[in-house]
Image: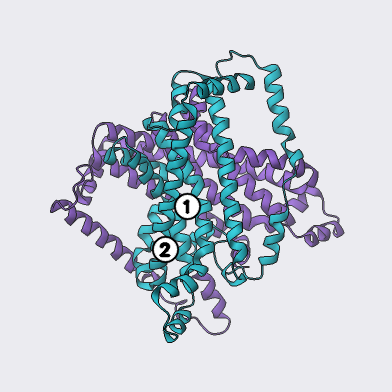
Chain colours: A purple, B cyan
């Protein structure tokens, strides 16, 4: 939306661009959500929905209170968010550094690309049993799996972005006799930014998927573990609370990432938007 | 917010009209085989320096022995077959349902606004969190495995189709109405060519998630499949078997993703540049 608005601004003020946030906000979407929840509630109350293990939305809301009072929900959210974010941060550093190094050297790329291609297409979930063997049922296991999975996403996208930098830009850097470090920070990273950002986002999503998966399979902490505990305790309402928390956590983490990018790197965001359009 | 779908799929937006020739060129840029050297060297070193009975890092030759054992006991190939069957079926169902819903939601501005946040919620929810709920609702069954995989793979397909439909020019449909085209003909000649690339991209993005969820379900519940074998060898502290299965699954996934990419490029080859 923002792109179309800013584009038409130059010609004539776009009708939607200056309206207050509450008129631009998608109230219809909220209404849609409420309608769906209402249908769900009615279907459950009237017995139209025959699944015993699907709680009504009101029952789910009621279950939130209990979980918060026990403190189980907060600690689970903190654990999962911590591992996913921590693992993702490690993956970003490793992935961007290796991606830039391999992307800059044609020789290094040609001697490693096929190995990377093979290793990254291994479904990361299969590393959970291996990690359990090596690290036991622990948070270390979860972190290792998250880092492993997210690193490939960041690395692959960084590599692709750096390799896509136009040769003209590199020649310019040569003309200005830039040092290697300056060339990377001033030319390569900004030019590859849109690709790298895609890698950061995909990596964050995967980090969360794998964190929850590892908790479901083996680590006795976090939202995924909460899900399995309530599953075994046959407490569907509390299970749905954990499920919704996972979804909300995903949305919040994505929003924070988006916000940080927009605030810290406005130029790069604009470049990324342009890159996506072209 | 409306752009969040495309960010996860940078090539999804059907705006890349000028980029076409470049894209084709990049496809031809094959990865040289000598790049496999580091992997081969690492495995050789592991084989030379490792020991057969290391509890954590058994050497590669023992992986092969374990796989041969599993194969001769008749466990391996039926399990792999079960996993692949369920995976393909799920992707097919997800493509059909996701494609149809995506077209319907994307074609109507009202539905698009009304369902947008709900769809975004499901897309942002890590699919692995749905597995325990599915197990509770449907039990340890094949239906459960397939439904969960469909639920995981459907979002990229649905949201990409929706994004493509949003860019679809409604005037085309009006023209079609003037020409008194039948409903089926409109779908076949106007709508499908416009969303086909988006659907194919959705499948390519959805396939890895589908693989993750299928394997997670199998690892967790022991429902017949290669993931169940993997979990069993881990529970038996059979590390060589675990590594062997890991490599086997990885190679199958590699082949699977390669096939999907090949199918995608085969189909997009025929499409007019405007649909890219």
Q: Are marks 1 and 2 on the same chain?
A: no
How packed is label 1: few (under 14 Cα within 10 Å), some, or many (20 or more)?
A: some
According to the picture, the residue beneath numbered tag 1 turns out to be: A254
Q: Secondary structure at mark 1?
A: helix
Q: Is residue A237 left or right of residue B72?
A: left
Residue B149 placement (x, y as % from top left): 41, 45
For disc 2, the marked residue is: B102
Q: Position of residue A276 (x, y in %)?
A: 60, 64
Who is closer to the viewer here, B97 or B135?
A: B97
* Picture disc at residue A100: none
- Indicate the chain on which mark 1 is placed: A
- The residues tagged by marks 1 and 2 sit, at their Cα atoms, a distance apart of 23 Å
Depth check, front residue: A213 or A78? A213
Asked whether residue B247 is in view, the answer is yes
User: Tag 2: Cα neighbours inside 10 Å, few (<14), some, or many (≥20)?
Assistant: many
Residue A205, percent from left and from top: 49, 47
């Amino acid at each position: 939306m923002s792109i179309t608005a800013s584009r038409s601004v130059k010609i004539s003020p776009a009708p939607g661009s200056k309206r207050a946030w509450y008129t631009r906000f998608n109230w219809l979407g909220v209404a849609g959500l409420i309608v769906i929840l209402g249908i769900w509630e009615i279907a459950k109350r009237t017995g139209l929905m025959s699944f015993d293990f699907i709680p009504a939305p009101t029952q789910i809301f009621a279950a939130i209170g209990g979980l918060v009072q026990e403190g189980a929900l907060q600690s689970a959210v903190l654990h999962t968010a911590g591992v996913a974010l921590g693992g993702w941060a490690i993956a970003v550093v490793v992935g961007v550094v290796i991606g830039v190094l391999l992307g800059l050297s044609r020789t290094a790329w040609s001697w490693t690309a096929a190995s990377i291609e093979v290793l990254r297409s291994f479904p990361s979930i299969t590393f959970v049993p291996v990690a359990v063997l090596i690290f036991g049922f622990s948070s270390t296991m979860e972190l290792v799996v998250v880092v492993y999975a997210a690193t490939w996403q960041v690395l692959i996208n960084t590599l692709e972005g750096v390799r896509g930098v136009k040769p003209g830009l590199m020649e310019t850097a040569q003309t200005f006799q830039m040092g290697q470090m300056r060339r990377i920070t001033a030319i390569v990273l900004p030019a590859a930014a849109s690709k790298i950002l895609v890698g950061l986002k995909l990596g964050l999503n995967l980090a969360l998927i794998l964190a929850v998966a590892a908790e479901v399979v083996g680590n006795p902490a976090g939202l995924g573990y909460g899900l399995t505990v309530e599953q075994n305790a046959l407490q569907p309402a509390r299970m749905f609370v954990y499920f919704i928390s996972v979804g909300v956590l995903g949305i919040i983490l994505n929003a924070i990432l988006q916000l940080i990018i927009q605030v810290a790197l406005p130029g790069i965001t604009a470049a990324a938007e342009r890159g996506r359009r072209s | 917010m409306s752009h969040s779908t495309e960010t996860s799929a940078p090539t999804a937006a059907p705006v890349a009209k000028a980029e076409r020739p470049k894209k084709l060129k990049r496809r031809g840029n094959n990865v040289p085989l000598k790049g496999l050297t580091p992997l081969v060297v690492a495995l050789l070193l592991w084989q030379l320096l490792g020991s057969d009975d290391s509890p954590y890092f058994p050497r590669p030759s023992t992986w092969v022995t374990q796989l041969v054992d599993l194969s001769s006991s008749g466990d391996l190939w039926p399990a792999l077959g079960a996993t692949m069957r369920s995976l393909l079926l799920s992707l097919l169902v997800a493509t059909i349902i996701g494609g149809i819903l995506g077209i319907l939601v994307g074609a109507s501005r009202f539905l698009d606004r009304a369902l947008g946040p709900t769809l975004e919620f499901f897309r942002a929810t890590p699919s692995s969190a749905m597995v325990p709920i599915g197990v509770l609702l449907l039990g340890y069954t094949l239906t459960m495995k397939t439904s969960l995989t469909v639920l995981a793979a459907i979002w990229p397909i649905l949201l990409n189709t929706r994004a493509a439909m949003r860019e679809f020019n409604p005037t085309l449909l009006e023209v079609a109405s003037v020409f008194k085209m039948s409903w089926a003909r409109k779908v076949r000649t106007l709508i499908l060519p416009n969303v086909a690339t988006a659907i194919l991209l959705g499948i390519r993005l959805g396939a890895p998630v589908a693989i993750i969820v299928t394997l997670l379900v199998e690892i967790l519940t022991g429902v017949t499949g290669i993931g169940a074998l993997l979990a069993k060898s881990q529970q038996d502290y059979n590390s060589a078997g675990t590594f062997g299965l890991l490599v086997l699954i990885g190679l199958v996934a590699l082949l699977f993703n390669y096939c999907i990419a090949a199918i995608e490029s085969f189909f997009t080859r025929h499409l007019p540049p405007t649909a890219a």
